Image (cartoon, grey):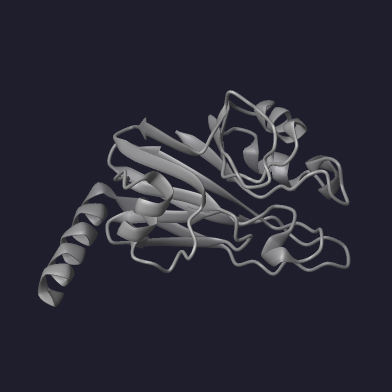
C-alpha cells in the first residue's frame, strides 16, 4: 500500500489552498491509497482537499479546533503485517523510542511511528522502529510560506519503504529541506530490536 504523509498544513495562512503553491503536493498524493495527516490541519477544507486523492486519517494537533470523524488524538493501524502509530507531537524526537511511545501512544508498541509538529523532516530507523516526520509542505523549518516536504510510506508484507520528498522551490523562497529514503525488511526491524535489547541489557 502506498500511503501519503502530510503534516502541519496550517491553512488558511498567506494562501487559502495547497493548490496555490503549485501542483507538486497534489502530484505526490495522487495515486496514494491512504493519506495520514499528522496534525495541525487547522482548516476542515484541507481534509476535504486531501480526500479527493484517498481516504484520510488525522492525528489531532494542538491547532485543530474542529470536529471530524476521521480525526483522533492518536491513530493506530495494522497494514500488511505492520503496526503503524501516528500522533501529532513526538518531540523531542531524539529521545529513546520507548519514551516517545509512552508520551505519544500511551506505550502502544508499533513498527512505524509517524508524527509532525516540528515542521522539520525526519526519517530514521532505530530501536526497532521506523520514525517518520514528513515536515511541512507549506511552512518548512518554520520559515515563511513556501514549498516544503511530504512523505510517502509504501508497505507490503515483510517490506517498508519510506521517503521524504522535497517539493521544489517557490519563487524567491528556497526550500531548506533534505530528501531522505529508507528501504527496510522485517529482518532489519528484528535485528534493530535485538541490538537495542542487547544494548539495554549491557548497560543495566
x and y percent of residue 8 in the render?
66, 50
Indicate the quadrant where residue 59 lies.
Answer: top right
Q: Nearer the viewer, residue 133 or 180?
A: 133
Q: Nearer the viewer, residue 156 or 36?
A: 36
Number of labelled discs? 0
- Name the residue rendered at 30%, 58% in the picture: 98
Compared with 164, 78 (above or below) is: above
- Horizontally, residue 2 falls left or right of residue 204, namely right
Quadrant position of the C terminus in the picture: bottom left
x and y percent of residue 200 in the render?
17, 69
Compared with 54, 99 (above or below) is: below
Residue found at the far top of this picture: 69
x and y percent of residue 79 in the render?
37, 32
Quadrant position of the N terminus in the picture: top left
- Name the residue rendered at 75%, 56% in the picture: 147
Q: Which of 11 and 168 is in front in this view?
A: 11
- Horizontally, residue 154 falls left or right of residue 37, namely left
- Name the residue rendered at 36%, 45% in the picture: 106
Indicate the quadrant where residue 55 lies.
Answer: top right
- Name the residue rendered at 18%, 65% in the picture: 195
Residue found at the far bottom of this picture: 203
Amino acid at each position: 500500500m502506498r500511503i501519503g504523509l502530510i503534516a502541519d498544513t496550517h491553512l488558511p495562512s498567506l494562501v487559502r489552498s495547497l493548490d496555490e503553491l503549485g501542483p507538486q503536493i497534489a502530484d505526490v498524493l495522487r495515486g496514494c491509497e491512504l493519506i495520514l495527516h499528522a496534525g495541525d490541519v487547522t482548516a476542515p477544507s484541507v481534509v476535504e482537499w486531501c480526500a479527493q486523492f484517498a481516504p484520510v486519517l488525522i492525528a489531532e494537533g494542538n491547532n485543530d479546533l474542529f470536529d471530524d470523524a476521521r480525526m483522533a488524538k492518536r491513530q493506530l493501524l495494522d497494514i500488511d503485517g505492520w503496526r503503524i502509530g501516528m500522533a501529532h507531537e513526538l518531540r523531542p524526537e531524539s529521545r529513546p523510542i520507548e519514551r516517545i511511545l509512552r508520551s505519544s501512544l500511551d506505550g502502544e508498541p508499533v513498527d512505524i511511528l509517524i508524527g509532525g509538529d516540528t515542521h522539520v523532516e525526519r526519517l530514521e530507523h532505530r530501536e526497532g522502529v521506523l520514525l517518520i516526520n514528513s515536515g511541512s509542505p507549506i511552512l518548512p523549518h518554520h520559515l515563511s510560506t513556501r514549498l516544503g516536504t511530504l512523505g510517502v510510506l509504501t508497505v507490503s508484507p515483510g517490506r517498508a519503504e519510506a521517503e521524504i520528498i522535497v517539493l521544489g522551490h517557490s519563487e524567491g523562497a528556497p526550500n531548506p529541506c533534505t530528501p531522505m529514503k529508507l528501504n527496510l525488511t522485517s529482518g532489519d526491524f528484528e535485528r534493530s530490536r535485538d541490538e537495542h535489547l542487547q544494548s539495554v541489557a549491557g548497560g543495566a
